[in-house]
Every structure is written in structure tokens, then in C-alpha cells.
Image (cartoon, rainbow, N blue to C red):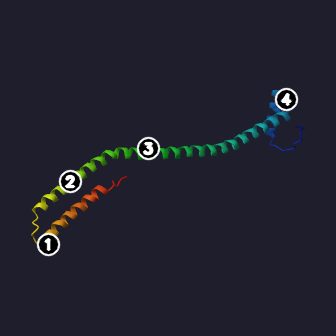
Amino acid sequence: MPDKQLNVWIPEELRDYVARRAEKERRGMNSIIAELIQQDMAQHNDKVVGQNSLIALREIVSAEIRQAHAQLRHDLRDDRQHEAEPFFEFLRKQTDRLAGLIIMRAFRNSNKVNLSEPKEAKSTFFKRIEKWLFFWSLLTLSQHPFL
């Protein structure tokens, strides 16, 4: 690449520094000035590249964190569901037991109802049975509120 002339005014102490360095290294002032400018260009380009790579790196890290967070939420949901299964099994067994006791009591009480009794007594008894059966159906069909 052909050399071009650069006429600039610089402070005297900077010019003296370049002259001392040229004398010490036994090189021309032009080569020292060119080297200093090349170093500055390289440093400036590294900063720009570093800033661009920092942005890309930040995006990569945030994407990884989001993915890890989603995986942890999924694992937590699976763990909670796995831990809740024994509770639901226990709840089902107790609900079935309670429903059986309610129905057994309803049949025992139905034997005590005299069919020759007035219609009001029979309807009161059957209303109680309907309430028990309704309660039983709510227990067996309900889901756990936390899942």
C-alpha cells in the first residue's frame, strides 16, 4: 500500500516522545507513528467486536436461563403430581368407604320406614337419602384444588 502524507499538529511533548523512541529503537518516526495508529485501530476494533459479542453472549445466556427455568417448572409440576398420587388414592379410598357407610345407613334406615306411614314421612326419609347421595357424588367427582 503506498504511503500518504499526514500533516498534523500535535503537542510538543508528544512529538518529543516519538523522537526519543525513534532514536532509542533506531527507527524512523514515521514507522513509530504508523505502529501507534495501527495499535489504536486494533484496540478500537476489539472494543467494537467485544461489544457486539457481549450482546450475543447475553442473548445466549438469557435463552439458556429461560430454558432451564422452564425445565425446572416442568420437573416441579411432575414431582408435585407424583407426590399427590398417594394422597388422591387415600382420598378415593376414604370417599368410597364413606359412601359405603352412608348407603349402608340409608338401607338400614329404609328398613325402619314403615310403608304404611304417611307420605310426608317417606318423602323426608328419601330427601335425606338424596342429600347423602349428593354429598357422596360431590366427594367422588371433585378434584384436588391444588393441581
- At horizontal 21% and vertical 61% (from top left) the residue drawn is 132
Q: Is residue 124 left or right of residue 27?
A: left
Which tag, 1 or 3, sits closer to the chain's start? Answer: 3
Q: 35 or 84, which is in the foreground?
A: 84
The three-letter code of the residue at mark 3 reads: Asp
- At horizontal 11% and vertical 67% (from top left) the residue drawn is 115
Give the SS element for disc 2: helix
Query: Dots 4 and 3: beta carbons under 8 Å?
Result: no
How far separated are the C-alphas under marks 4 and 3?
68 Å
Q: For mark 1, does the 10 Å Cα neighbourhood hold few (<14), some (14 to 19), or many (20 or more) residues?
A: few
The three-letter code of the residue at mark 2 reads: Gly
The three-letter code of the residue at mark 4 reads: Arg
How far separated are the C-alphas under marks 3 and 2?
38 Å
- Identify the mark at residue 100; answer none if there is no mark: 2
- Identify the mark at residue 120; answer none if there is no mark: 1
Q: Position of residue 113 (x, y in %)?
A: 11, 64
Q: Which residue is mark 3?
A: 75
Q: Position of residue 33 (x, y in %)?
A: 82, 37
The three-letter code of the residue at mark 1 reads: Glu
Q: 127 or 6, which is in the foreground?
A: 127
